[in-house]
Amino acid sequence: MGGLFEDLKRIDRKLIRHYEFQESHLKAVKRQCDEARKFEKVTNEIRMERDVLQGQVHSYLAQISSLKSKIEEQRCLVGAYERQVNAEYEVHLRKLESRNEDLRSSITQKDKQLKEANEQLRQLYKMLKSHEMLSWRKKTEERVFITILKNDLQAIWNEKIKIEDEFRRLKKFCGYKDNDFQAGLFSEDYVGTVLRRSKSTSDLTLQGGSEMEGDGLSPRKDNPFTAPNTPVCYSAKNSHGEGSDSPAYSRQKILQELTAIEKKLSKHKEEMKSRSPWKAGMDAHEKPTSTEKETSDKNEPSPRTDAEKPEEPKKQNSE
């Protein structure tokens, strides 16, 4: 179970890093929104300047038309005087025309800037939309991963409770004490050892069950499941010398139950290895960068040394 808790802690750390990654994306989205607002403000200012310049152009065109009309009137009235006056007006007209050309060139330049700003704004809107879709997708995947993790955790706890109930029932059936169960005598290694020992001594148990005493009661002497300081169980014979509580019958029953529990444990471990929700969820996300890998390697706990490994339960000499 310690390995399962280590896996859950590692998954929790990965979820925290994923949440920080999402927070950075949200900050980038906010920053791009601020830039988009700035571009909109600049665009509005350019548009206002263009409107002002267009108004000036219209006013200059009106002035030019009025000046042309005045020139025509002066030409009709006088000759030489008209030429002198028209010379000044023509100079002023050239200035206005040059100014008009400058204003037209500035208007075209402002139009180009406005088009570029609109294109940048459009690209920013696309990037903002893609970031929003990515954030929504990641939130959805996080919800799915959290649901899968919760379901797997609930299944692990249910399986753990079932296995503990099975062990307690077998402990009670074999006469083990509570402190033996809490000390880890029913670990997976110990169950495998007991199964191997029970297979090697099954013939001795069958012989001991058939050679019971004639008073109808016989102690379970050859049972390797009997813990120290455990009262000896007695059982009545049947017509064949083996009752429902005889050593051979109870030994075979316990052997079958322990084999079934061992199969359940191995099957549960294989299912947990093959069914990893975080491994399936990482395929949908981007691969972590080298810095994130280094931080994850630093945050992962170091493997246990030989000194930190839990002590194996001592084998009981029941033979």
Image (cartoon, rainbow, N blue to C red):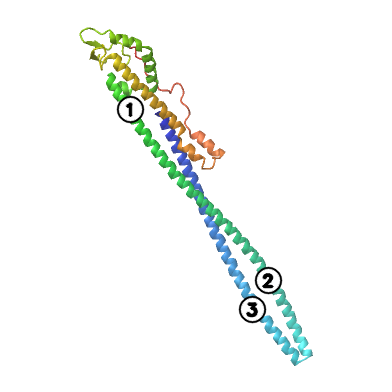
What element does badge 3 sit on?
Answer: helix
Give the CA separation, mark 2 to mark 1: 88 Å
Mark 2 vs 1, N-terminal side: 2
Mark 2 or 1, closer to the camera: 1
* Residue density around tag 2, few if under 14, some if 14–19, many if 20 or more, within 10 Å: some
Residue 2: quarter of image: top left
Q: Does residue 212 sit above or below 30 in this rendering?
A: above
Give the CA separation, mark 3 to mark 2: 13 Å
Mark 3 vs 2, N-terminal side: 3
Where is residue 161 shown, x and y percent of the image?
33, 31
Q: Does residue 264 sit above or below 200 in this rendering?
A: below
Evaluate if marks 3 and 1 touch, with contact meaning CB atoms under 8 Å apart: no
Name the amino acid type tagged 3: Ser
Mark 3 vs 1, N-terminal side: 3
Residue 212: quarter of image: top left
Residue 168: quarter of image: top left
Q: Which residue is mark 2?
A: 104
Q: Which mark is residue 59?
A: 3
Residue 11 is at least partly visible in this image: yes
Name the amino acid type tagged 2: Arg
Q: Nearest the camera: 299 or 8?
A: 8
Where is residue 18 shown, x and y percent of the image?
48, 42
Q: Residue at 53%, 52% (x, y): give it.
A: 130
Q: Nearest the camera: 132 or 192?
A: 192
Q: Which residue is mark 1?
A: 164
Residue 226 is at least partly visible in this image: no
Q: Residue at 41%, 42% (x, y): give it.
A: 147
Evaluate if marks 2 and 1 touch, with contact meaning CB atoms under 8 Å apart: no
Quarter containing the C terminus: top left
Name the amino acid type tagged 1: Glu
